[in-house]
Amino acid sequence: MSGAEGDAGDAEGAGDAEGAAVRTRGLTKRFRSGQVGVDGVDLLVPRGAVYGFLGPNGSGKTTTIRMLLGLVSPTAGSVELLGTAMPGGGAEVLPRVGALVEGPAFHPYLSGEANLRRLDAADPTSAPGSRTRRIGAALERVGLTAAAGKRYRQYSLGMKQRLGLAAALLRPRDLLLLDEPTNGLDPQGTREVRALVREVADAGATVLVSSHLLSEIEQVCSHVGIMSRGTLLAQGPREEIADEGTTEVRVMTRPDQRAHAVRVLSGLGLDGARADGEVVAAPLGSVAVEKVAQAVVGDGIDLLGLEVRRPTLEDVFVRLTGEGFDVAR
Amino acid sequence: MSLVDSPPAGPPVSSARATARLLGSELRLVFGRVRNIVLLVGLAAVPLLIGTVLFVTQDTPVAGQGPPFLDRVTGNGVFLVFAALVSCLPFLLPLCVSIVSGDAVAGEASAGTLRYLLVVPVPRTRLLLVKAVAALAYAAAAVTAIAGVGLVAGAAFFGVGDVVLLSGDTIPLAEGMLRTLGVVGYVVASLTGLVAVGLFLSTLTEVPVAAMAATVVVAIVSGVLDALPQLSAIHPALLTHHWLDFGEFLRLEVDASTLFAGLAVQAAWVAVFGALAWSRFTTADVSS
Ligand SMILES: Nc1ncnc2c1ncn2[C@@H]1O[C@H](COP(=O)(O)OP(=O)(O)OP(=O)(O)O)[C@@H](O)[C@H]1O
Ligand SMILES: [Mg+2]
């Protein structure tokens, strides 16, 4: 993982939120419909972290990001971006923040480049002299140079998404808030986004990436926060969150020896040992894995393979959110 | 490559410079849009159409027949400007102004570009101001297009000469041109209230067509109410009541008080709806 993880972990370990890139306290949004879209969220994104903001559809990720940026005013609670209170400090802090909110949005009848020009012209702190160069660099970075002069309405879904990322990267940023940045991208594009996030983070910036497809961003995250029905169920360094799941040991042996292997594992005190398809699996608990190997071999079982499966974020995610395919509300 | 250590893109510029820069971008957006250009061309075609009809039929309307000033066009091409403005004021000009001002905020909201402008960040007050100025600039361009094409077409078809005023007095052409400028200025000023109404309605919805239609309806209802004698008490305050008062410029002694009354009514509409638009836009959640 990125080198930023260490510092970030320390910062949190010391309970020091001063250096947080994003900090919210009791952030709440009650819509006029009466629905509470975000409910008492205390977000803490340490500086330098790549924070995976996960949650099923409708869990309140986008609404939270809108409140971070001052687009939607919270019903209750406070927001700090890079140490500056929002929305009051927006003029000061937002130039250092790149954002992608609920997909890209541009003027359909302008070219990609003209759209970026407009955004850059709107920025009081950007230098007109370097505009062409910066726009060229941003387009290049997202692989859109060839389509720069094409009208936005003629862009494919993935090209639109790339242009949105280019807009977020128009200037050097200290913080990127990316809402579903991989939506609509092909596998190659998804990989590029991951590489881009890594690159930005390696340069020292903080990135918050939201997604409901955790497999897409899991690999780049140093931290995760898991939203469900408007509340933040868990957040912290990725390893700590993932460790809340259970590590499993999986023993591969011949089919006729599987029942025997289950008995051996149970004998070691591994509750829940069972034949799981072609392997025999059990939660590892506090038993050392070499003990398992010795016991199996010592009992005359042919050990064809042994695997320790660490809990994945997905296991934790599914356990915490407990939601099926349907949106919760 | 480092993103963080690289120098900032530039020093912050003053608020006035930033507003001017955004206004430039906004004007390019409004005047570069094909729909808006087509509308301008359509408006400019009105004097051309009137002039062609009068020229081809070689038929001078009897005084009092048809819209005001139409009977004078064949005598002096300058009057084509006034005849065309009178023809466009009830519907075509308000329509075009409503389309652009109603689209101002709602169009950005429906495209989703509003949220990205706000996180750039553009302060909401500045954005609203720039939108208002650009819509007004479009209204000015529309009136100028009608007047400009009217003057050129009138001169080409019928020639221009000293201007005979409504009172029967004659003034030199040069002074006639000055008064024509005054007419253009007054008509543009008459449209400011409608721009403010359109801008306010535009902050209420994410559906630009709804804001445009509602703005046109306001102008038309105002015209309808203005035609009901039973409501004469409220007539002076109506948005459209003073629109045709530009004829005042064609009297020997221009009555400034009449013109000021019209301008004051527009200022009042601008103040009320500008304030409404501001209070709405600076507090609304942007969830488009
Ligand atoms: N403007 C609004 N008015 C009323 N309810 C809203 C509004 N915006 C969002 N909601 C509701 O708030 C909840 C959270 O929505 P949000 O868009 O934040 O979810 P999300 O986590 O981003 O979902 P997804 O993964 O699908 O993007 C949803 O139930 C949604 O219906
Ligand atoms: Mg969302």
Image: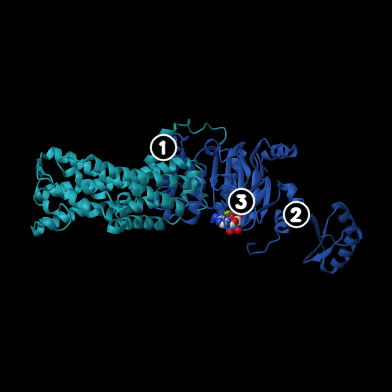
Chain colours: A blue, B cyan
Residue type beneath disc 3:
Lys
Horizontal placement of A155 versus B135: left or right?
right
Is the residue at mark 2 from the same chain as the one at mark 1? no
Labels 3 and 1 within one chain:
no
| Left or right side of B140 for B109 | right
Which mark is drawn over residue A29?
3
Q: Can you give x and y, in whole percent of width and height, for residue A5 in the image? A: 69, 40
For mark 3, name the chain. A
Residue type, mark 1 in image? Thr
Q: Amino acid at mark 2?
A: Pro
Mark 3 and mark 1 in contact? Answer it, CB < 8 Å. no
> Label 2: which residue?
A311
Q: Nearer the viewer, residue B94 or B138?
A: B94
Residue B1 versus residue A319 in the image, above or below: above
Q: Which mark is residue B258?
A: none
Distance from the alpha carbon under mark 3 to that under mark 1: 32 Å
Where the N terminus of chain A falls, by quadrant? top right
Circle 1 sits on which residue? B19
Q: Is mark 2 within 8 Å of ligand 1?
A: no
**Residue at 43% over, 37% down:** A131
